[in-house]
Every structure is written in structure tokens, then in C-alpha cells.
Image (cartoon, coloured by chain):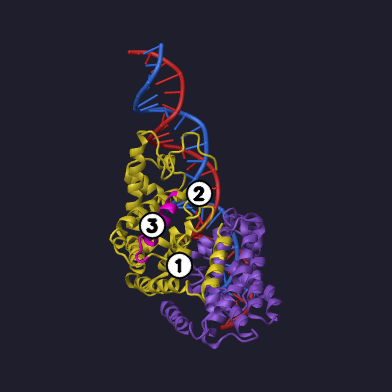
Chain colours: A purple, B yellow, C blue, D red
Amino acid sequence: MSEPAGVPPGRVGERRPPAHGERTRELIVRTALRLFAERGYERTTMRAIADAAGLSVSNAYYYFRSKDHLVQEFYADIQHRHREEAAEALSRTGFVDRLRGVLHAGVTVMAPYHGFAGSFVGVAINPRSPSSPFSDASAAAREAAIGLFRDVVEGAKPAVDRQVRADLPELLWLAYLGLTLYWVHDMSYEQDRTRRLIDLATPFVGRLIRISRLPGMRPITTDLLWLVRKVRS
Amino acid sequence: MSEPAGVPPGRVGERRPPAHGERTRELIVRTALRLFAERGYERTTMRAIADAAGLSVSNAYYYFRSKDHLVQEFYADIQHRHREEAAEALSRTGFVDRLRGVLHAGVTVMAPYHGFAGSFVGVAINPRSPSSPFSDASAAAREAAIGLFRDVVEGAKPAVDRQVRADLPELLWLAYLGLTLYWVHDMSYEQDRTRRLIDLATPFVGRLIRISRLPGMRPITTDLLWLVRKVRS
DNA sequence: CTCCGGACTTGAACTAGTTCAAATCACGCT
DNA sequence: AGCGTGATTTGAACTAGTTCAAGTCCGGAG
């Protein structure tokens, strides 16, 4: 599994001296993303990608160690667009409004890929896969995603209770991963169920957070947060 | 994707007139399971399975439409052994004790497969896969698994609050799926983290259930259950 | 201009899941 | 015993991800 002799042409977030290959690399990504959207992941062969980009298959493999690594690129792209799509929601003030908006933005951005997202998730769920959300390789994308939820929390007015503020972004991100799993399995028209889940669950989350600081609940909240911290990898 | 001309040699739970092929079918399953345990999923090729069982590859495909379908068989096996391993825990009385025991039993049974369980989960998470826990094909296995948690709930003394009793088994099963995901990603020695999570989280679940019927909590519990029902496929 | 090393490309193979058309086998019926 | 039919079985191909060894290309050193 060590890097091939040639060169490791850079992970997602990495910057290197501008080589000529950068162009080719981007061409491959763009072509792959287009074909994924057109025909789905499994039915887009590496040969098809190479053909459509006007290269040889082995050349594509010079830039991406495997088809999985292309998926990683896909995530980076989605992540980026999620941020953009979420901008409007982040201009609101209420915590629940912000959270709901950001979640809907995520669903909106992923929508075109719903048909074959299962394949992607299947790849990503494997701890060994570079595109696993917990892998070192996707550390950058993960930080960005958690950062989005940090914005949700920190920009909220009235401010979120201090006790939970630190842990909440990561928890929300985890919940978002869960929501994605739900979405993948959601076969309703235009994934309406997922939309509805967001609309129903976000006020509930807000309520729980508000309740969490009532005198009677404090010890439970404390214990739960302790559990969460204890259990985090 | 319709059945091949020959015959659909039966889904997991199905009974058919005892054909000769039944033997062969079981031979394949046993061989595959052994090889999976020995070398993992990906490195066990269909050719290797066929060789070890003394058949041709295409013959194996006569009995199993795909490698994924073999995974389904794997789940059925695990499920069965989970039940056996859980027997002792189900002889206890306290809800938390029972739940904890059943969860530990699950982890114990899965342990030998931890190294490559990621591949299995990756296959199963795809809604299209027959081995998805939500698929029609695994309805039987799913019912059995939920049944296990129903036993946990219904056999508990003192009895679990009536309000949540109906929904709890399915929720616990979902939580168990989540626990499995955690376990897959748990790289600690002998998955100790997962064990610890079980030990910490089960009393917590017990506490939440007890609290849920306090007068102040009732409306929240009701709303949450309503949400759960609304959101279930 | 020429040469060198590293960046980039490529066609040909290799592997493994899957399919297919053509056997072969088993067995009840005549 | 001979036959028909459906159940089994098989070798050979096909597809697609991946690897490999052998180039080709390009920019800077001399």
C-alpha cells in the first residue's frame, strides 16, 4: 500500500508546486463526476472515464490510486457545495432555523446523486477506505464538515448553552451522517421523508438542548456528555 | 434481475421439497464461511470457494446469484449464533442486565470477523443489496433480530413502561445496528471500546426509560414516539 | 544544442465477479 | 430398458478494477 514509484499526486486538500499534471487531474475529476451523475457509480467504468477524458486508463491510475479515491474527490466537491448552499441558512439567527437550513442544504446538494449514493456510502462505511469519513485521508473534509456545524452552533442567537457548545458540532455532524444513511434508504418521492424528518427532528433537538440545562436534567446531561467524550475514538 | 432459468434455489428462510442440491448448497455455505473467517471477504474469491468445496465456479453461481448473496447467508448464521449466545443473558431479570448481556453476546459472536467486517457492512449498507438489513430478502433475519430485543423488553422485571414497550424492540435493534457500525470502526484491542460503550450506555438507556414516565417528561416522550412512528418507513 | 532525470503516458496483462450455452445427471413413466 | 424433463454441472468467455514494464516528454544543467 505504499505510494507508487512515480509520485503521490497529492491528496485532496494538499498543495504542491504547480505541475502540468494538475490540469489532467482536474480533467479526470470533472469527467468522472459528470459520468457518475449521468450513469451512477458502478456503471461508470474507469475505462469510460479515461475514454471520455481522452486518456488511457493507466494514466487515470497515475493520478488516482483507485476508483475509491475518486469517490473521495466526489465528497470534497459535495462538501464544498454544501457550504455554499448553506450560506443563506447561516444568515438566520435561531439555532433550530440554522440547523434545519443547513441540513436541508445538504439534502439539496446530494439530491442528484440519490440513485446511486448507496454505492458511495457502501465504499465510505468501510474503515479501510480512504473515503471513510473517519479516515486520515478525509481529515480535511471532516474538519470542514464539522466546521459547518460549528458555525451553526456559534452563530446562533440566543446563544447555545455553554455546557454543550463544545461537543455539539461534532455530535451534529454525526447526526448528519446518520441522516445521510436515512436519506440513502429513503425511496419516497424526492426524498420527502428525509425532508420531513429534518423538519420534525430539528425542533426536537432544540427542545432537548433547552431542557438539558434545567436543574433536574443537569446531572443527566453531564453524564451523557461524559459518555460521549469517553466513547469518542 | 429476474431469476435464472434453472431455479431460484431458495432464500434464506425458505423451505422446499428436499432436492439433492440442498447438500451442495450447504457445503458451499460452510466452505465460504470458513474461508471468510480464514482470509476475509475480499480475499476469498468465488474461485477459491468453489475449489475448496470441490465444484466449479459456475456451479456455485447456480446456488447463489452473487457473492453478496453469500453474505446474506453469513448474517443468518451470525444471527442464529447470537440467539444462542444470548440465552444466558435472557435468563436474567433486570432490563439493563438483559440488554447489556444481549449486546455483549452480539459482539462476542461477531468478534472473529472483525478484521473484514467492514467489507460486509459496506455491502449491507447499500439499500439495493439483498443483505441490507432493511431489504425484503432479509425480512426473516430482521424479524428474528427484532424478536431478540422484544424478548429483552418483554421478559424484563420490573416490567418496562407500557408507553414505550411496543416501539422499544425496534429502536433497540436500530441502536444495535449503530453499535455494529461503531464496532466495525473500533480498532482498540479486542474491541474493548465497544464493550465499554455497552457497559456505559445501557444503564443510561435504562435511566432514560425510567425518566420518560415522570410527569414532566411525559409530553416529550409522547412527541418523540410520535416522531419515531412518523419517520419509520 | 544535447543530455539527464523526473514527470507523465501507455498497451498489455492479471485478477476476480459474473454470465452463458452446452453438457450431464436423476428419476418417474411407459 | 428407453425416454423425457427438469435439476445440476461445467468450461469458456466477458467485464471491469488494477498493475506493470516500457516508453515518451519536458525543463534545466552544461
Callout 1 amino acid? Pro
**Is there CB contact under 8 Å for labels 3 and 1?**
no
Judging depth in this view, the residue of B109 and B6 nearest the camera is B109
* Residue B178 percent location from the top left of the image: 46, 66
Residue A127: numbered disc: 1
User: Mark 2: which secondary structure?
Assistant: helix
Q: Can marks 3 and 2 be said to lie on one chain?
A: yes
Q: Which chain does tag 1 point to?
A: A
Q: Chain of mark 3?
A: B
Distance from the alpha carbon under mark 2 to that under mark 1: 27 Å
The residue identified by callout 2 is: B136
State whether residue A195 is above or below residue B59.
Answer: below
Q: Quadrant of residue B117?
A: bottom left
Q: Main secondary structure of the magenta part?
A: helix
Which region is colored magenta? Answer: B140-158
Element carrying mark 3: helix
- In the foreground, A67 or D2: D2
Q: Name the kind of residue labelled 3 in the image.
A: Leu
- Residue in the picture at 39% in, 71% down: B202
Q: CA distance from mark 3 to mark 2?
A: 19 Å
Neighbours of disc 2 within 10 Å: few (<14), some (14-19), many (20+): few
Describe the element under mark 1 as helix, strand or loop: loop
Q: Is residue A17 above or below residue A40?
A: below
Q: Which residue is mark 3?
A: B148
Where is residue B216? Give x, y as percent.
52, 77
At x 37% / y 33%, what residue is drawn?
A: B19
